[in-house]
Image (cartoon, rainbow, N blue to C red):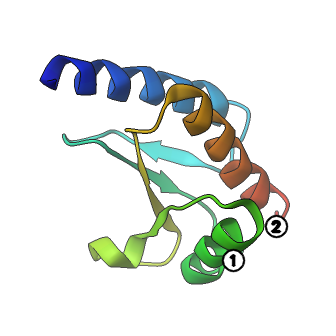
């Protein structure tokens, strides 16, 4: 099971890095372990408003950075565990929603 989780996380992290290359305003923080990815975005919209919009409009669930005590607004925490196709589609919606605010 551990190997399957590691493989999934690596695959989704690679997908995330590929998608993020096209969005210069978004930064992916290097994972320090676990199965979460931290996305840094410009503070063009508050974390809570963005999270609620993603969930309500697109059915995409992510966590605001303040759940994890980040020092400022502008962070999202995304799980690397979803099936890769769903992960990629959801992350594209996250990035498109942020990019629309720039």
On the image, the x and y values in percent for residue 4 come to 25, 20
Q: Residues within 10 Å of mark 1 (few under 14, many from 20)?
A: some
Regarding mark 1 in the picture, which secondary structure is present there?
Answer: loop
Tell me the tag on residue 101: 2
Q: Residue at x 63, y 77 (%)?
A: 52
Q: Nearer the viewer, residue 91 or 101?
A: 91
Asked if the residues shown at circle 1 and circle 2 are in contact, with their CB atoms under 8 angstroms apart, the answer is yes
Check the image and report above or below for 43 versus 4: below
**Residue to which mark 1 is pinned:** 45
Residue 9 relative to residue 101: left or right: left
Check the image and report above or below for 60 versus 21: below
Q: Residue at x 53, y 70 (%)?
A: 74
Q: Residue at x 73, y 33 (%)?
A: 22
On the image, the x and y values in percent for residue 91 come to 62, 44
Check the image and report above or below for 5 versus 26: above
On the image, the x and y values in percent for residue 71 come to 34, 77
- Do we see residue 71 in this rendering? no
Q: Distance from label 1 to label 2 (Cα)?
A: 7 Å
Q: Quadrant of the N terminus?
A: top left
Regarding mark 2 in the picture, which secondary structure is present there?
Answer: loop
């Amino acid at each position: 099971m551990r190997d399957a989780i590691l493989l999934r996380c690596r695959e989704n992290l690679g997908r995330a890095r590929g998608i993020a290359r096209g969005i210069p305003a978004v930064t992916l923080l290097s994972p320090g372990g676990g199965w979460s990815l931290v996305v840094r975005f410009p503070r063009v919209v508050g974390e809570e408003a963005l999270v609620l919009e993603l969930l309500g409009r697109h059915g995409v669930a992510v966590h605001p950075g303040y759940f994890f005590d980040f020092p400022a607004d502008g962070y999202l925490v995304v799980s690397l565990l979803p099936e890769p196709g769903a992960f990629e589609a959801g992350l594209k919606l996250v990035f498109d929603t942020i990019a629309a605010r720039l």
